[in-house]
C-alpha cells in the first residue's frame, strides 16, 4: 500500500459564517429551519402517542444530526452496519440498535467489543447467528440485547413463522450473555406505497404478524418488552398501534423526492425538504425541453433531463430565465440515504448563512 | 465540528497473503489476471493503431491502478474533478487532463496551483471560462494547456458550433499563460449503444463534428495537435479514425454489466470482468423466483431480485444448491465507476489469494 486512504481527506466546503453563495460544490446543504421543524413534528407526534423514537442513523450517518435527535427526545439511534454503530458510539451516542443481522467472526467481535461501552442491541433471524453472537460476547466479556427480526411483509430478512421465532427465543434463553429484548418488525417496502390507503393496508398485515409473534412469545413465558420498527412513511401507524414501543424513522429529518411522492396521511405531521445538494452550473447551452427525473431542481421552471456521474443536465421551461455559468442551484435528492453517504460534510445553514459544518461518517462505516 | 471526517478511516478489509475467503465484506475485489489481460488488450490495440492511451482515472479513482496503466503504456490519465487530479498527482502521476469544465474561483486556484508541478490540461466551452482560467494561472504563476470541448452528439457540455470553437481559440491565443492543445471530443452516450452498427453510426457523426472543428481551427492558423476522446465502448473507432491522437477508456480495466451488455465489435479486443463486490450472505430464506437486475451474481443459478441500501435479495433457480449463512458471493457491478467510489480499498487478488490492497481516492475527490 503506497498511501493511506485517510491521508487525503477533503477540507470542508464551507466554514461557519460563510454565505451560502460561497460554499464550494458539490455540497450537502441542510436547511436548519426545516430540519428543526421536522424534528419537532415527528418527536412531538411520538410523544403524544406514547412511543419512543429511535432515530435511524443510516439515513444521515452524521453524529451531529444524531445528537440533535437525542436532544429532541430520541432514546438512541439505530443503524445497519457495525461501522455505523462504532462511528455513532465514538461521538457519544450510548444507546444503539443495529437493526440488521450481522454475520462473520470479525464483525461479531467488533460488535461484542462495542457492547462493553454502550447499550447495544442487534437483530437475529437464524439459530446459527445466536450461537456465533454468544461466542463473540463470551470472548469479549460483554453482554448484548437481541431483537428477533420478524418478516412483516418485506420478504427480505426476518423469521417467516411463529415457530422460528419461538426456536430463536429458546436459543437466546439458553445462550450465555444474550438477552431477548423484543422484536424488530420493519416493513421497508410499505414506506413508499403511494396512497395512504395502501400504506394503512400494508401496516394492517405488518401489525398482525408482529402481534402474533409477540403474543406467542409472551404466552410461552418469554419477556418481549420491545417491538421496534416503522419508518418515515408509516410511523403514524406504528405510533398508534398499541403494539409498537419504538419507531425508527430516519429520512424525516432530511426528506427526499421519494418520500415527497407519497400522498399525505391526514394524521401525519407535514415534513419539509431539509437536505439538498448544492451544485454549480459548469456549462450553459440553449434548450427548452421539459422532462422529469431524479434528482429535481429546487428552482422553479427547471427540469432534470439526465444524470451521469459528474453531470446533471437540466432544461428550462418556456419563460424561465437562463442560468449563467457559475450559478448555484440546489438539487433535491431522490433518495437521501445514499446521497448523504457520498459526502464528507453536511453544511448546516439558516437563511443563506452557514451555521455549522458537520462531518459524515467515513465510507468505511459501510463495513 | 466535533470530529474530523478523516479520523475514522476504515482498516483495509484484507492484507496481502490472505485467502479470498477471509476478506471482510463488502469489499471491492479485483481479479489481477483479468485486469492485466484487459490492460494488454487495449494498450496493444492502441499501439497497433498509432494512438496514445490516456486512461480515464474517474472509472477507478485508484492511483495504484493508474500507475499500472502508465506502466502498460498510457501517456497519463484523465479525470473529471480537481480533487481527482490532485489525488493522482500526489501519487506521482505527472500528465493529467481534466476532461471536464471547471468553474469557480476556489477550484480554478487549485487547478492553477497543480499546474506548477505536473503537465496539466483542462477543457473549456465558454469564453468566460478562458478569462477565469487565465486569471487563476497569472495569480498562481503557472501555465495550463487547454482543450476546447466539442459537443460531438451528447448534448451535455462542449461548443455546439465551429464559430464558438473559433471564438474560444482566439480568446485562448489572447489570454496569458494558456495554450490551446487541441480538442476534447467525447460522446458518452455512444459508449452504451448496444449494437456495433449503432455505435459505428454514432461515431460517424462524432468524427464528422470533431474533424470539422479541427480543420477549421487549423485553416484559421491555430495549432490543434491533439484530438482526445473515446471510451471503452467506442475506442476502436477513435483509434482507427486518423483524427484522434488519444483515446480515453476507463472502464476497460474493470468492466461492468452495462459494458458487457454491448454486442461485441468484431475488431475489438475481448475484455474480461475484473472487478467485483464481495458480499456475505446474512439471511437465508427459501425462494425460487428468477428475475434479473443490477448488479448480478457471478455464481450461476442465482438472480438478483432487489437491491436496497444494505441488502441485495437474491433468488436461486430450480436445482441450484442453497447458500448457507455466512457464505461469500461476488456481485458484478452494473456500473463500475460509482461502485468504486463507494469503497476505500481495492483488494487485488490472483487465484483466490490477496496480492495487494490499494487505496481508492477519498470521497472528497468529488470536489
Image (spheres, coloured by chain):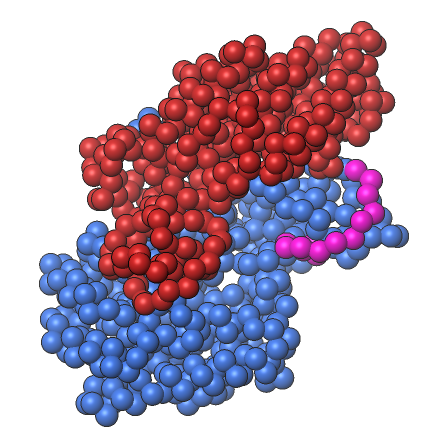
Chain colours: A blue, B red
Q: Pick the residue in front: B231 or B9.
A: B231
Whole-percent x and y of residue A106? 21, 51
Judge left or right: residue A354 versus residue B24.
right
Frontmost residue, B40 versus A278: B40
Image vertical order of residue A253 relative to residue B254, above or below: below
Q: Position of residue B76 (x, y in %)?
A: 51, 18
Q: In this view, does B138 lie above or below A189?
A: above
Direction bottom: furthest residue: A219
Quadrant of the frame with the N terminus of chain A? top left
Q: Is residue A296 magenta?
A: yes
Quarter-of-image position of residue A150: bottom left
Q: Classify residue B81 as left or right of residue A206.
A: right
On the question of residue A234 being in view, the answer is: yes
Q: In which quarter of the image is residue B39?
A: top left
Q: Is residue A107 visible to the viewer in this orientation of the structure?
A: no
Q: In this view, does B139 lie above or below A52?
A: above
Q: Is residue A274 magenta?
A: no
Q: Is the magenta stretch mostly helix, strand or loop?
A: loop
Give me the residue at 71% from left, 40% from top.
A281
Q: What stretch is highlighted in magenta?
A: A285-298
Q: In this rendered view, identify the residue nearer to me: A48 or A248.
A: A248
Which residue is rendered at x = 34% and y = 87% of the image? A212
Amino acid at each position: 500500500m503506497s498511501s493511506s486512504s485517510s491521508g487525503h481527506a477533503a477540507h470542508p466546503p464551507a466554514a461557519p459564517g460563510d454565505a451560502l453563495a460561497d460554499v464550494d460544490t458539490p455540497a450537502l446543504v441542510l436547511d436548519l429551519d426545516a430540519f428543526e421543524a421536522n424534528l419537532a413534528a415527528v418527536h412531538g407526534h411520538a410523544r403524544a402517542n406514547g412511543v419512543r423514537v429511535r432515530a435511524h442513523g443510516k439515513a444521515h450517518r452524521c453524529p451531529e444530526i444524531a445528537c440533535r435527535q437525542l436532544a429532541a427526545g430520541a432514546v438512541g439511534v439505530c443503524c445497519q452496519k457495525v461501522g455505523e454503530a462504532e462511528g455513532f458510539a465514538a461521538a457519544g451516542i450510548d444507546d444503539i440498535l443495529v437493526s440488521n443481522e450481522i454475520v462473520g467472526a470479525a464483525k461479531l467481535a467488533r460488535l461484542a467489543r462495542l457492547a462493553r461501552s454502550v447499550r447495544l442491541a442487534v437483530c437475529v433471524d437464524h439459530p446459527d447467528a445466536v450461537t456465533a453472537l454468544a461466542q463473540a460476547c463470551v470472548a469479549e466479556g460483554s453482554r448484548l440485547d437481541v431483537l428477533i427480526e420478524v418478516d412483516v411483509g418485506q420478504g427480505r430478512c426476518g423469521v417467516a413463522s411463529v415457530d422460528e421465532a419461538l426456536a430463536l427465543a429458546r436459543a437466546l434463553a439458553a445462550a450465555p450473555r444474550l438477552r431477548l429484548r423484543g422484536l424488530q418488525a420493519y416493513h421497508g417496502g410499505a414506506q413508499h406505497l403511494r396512497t395512504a390507503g395502501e400504506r394503512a393496508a400494508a401496516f394492517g398485515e405488518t401489525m398482525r404478524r408482529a402481534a402474533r409473534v409477540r403474543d406467542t412469545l409472551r404466552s410461552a413465558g418469554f419477556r418481549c418488552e420491545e417491538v421496534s420498527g416503522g419508518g418515515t412513511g408509516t410511523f403514524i401507524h406504528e405510533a398508534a398501534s398499541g403494539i409498537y414501543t419504538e419507531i425508527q424513522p430516519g429520512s424525516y429529518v432530511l426528506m427526499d423526492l421519494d418520500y415527497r411522492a407519497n400522498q399525505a396521511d391526514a394524521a401525519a405531521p407535514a415534513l419539509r425538504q431539509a437536505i439538498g445538494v448544492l451544485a454549480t452550473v459548469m456549462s450553459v447551452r440553449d434548450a427548452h425541453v421539459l422532462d422529469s427525473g431524479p434528482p429535481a431542481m429546487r428552482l422553479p421552471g427547471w427540469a432534470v433531463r439526465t444524470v451521469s456521474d459528474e453531470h446533471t443536465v437540466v432544461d428550462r421551461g418556456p419563460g424561465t430565465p437562463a442560468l449563467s455559468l457559475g450559478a448555484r442551484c440546489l438539487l433535491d435528492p431522490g433518495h437521501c440515504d445514499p446521497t448523504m453517504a457520498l459526502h464528507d460534510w453536511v453544511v448546516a445553514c439558516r437563511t443563506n448563512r452557514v451555521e455549522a459544518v458537520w462531518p459524515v461518517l467515513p465510507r468505511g462505516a459501510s463495513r
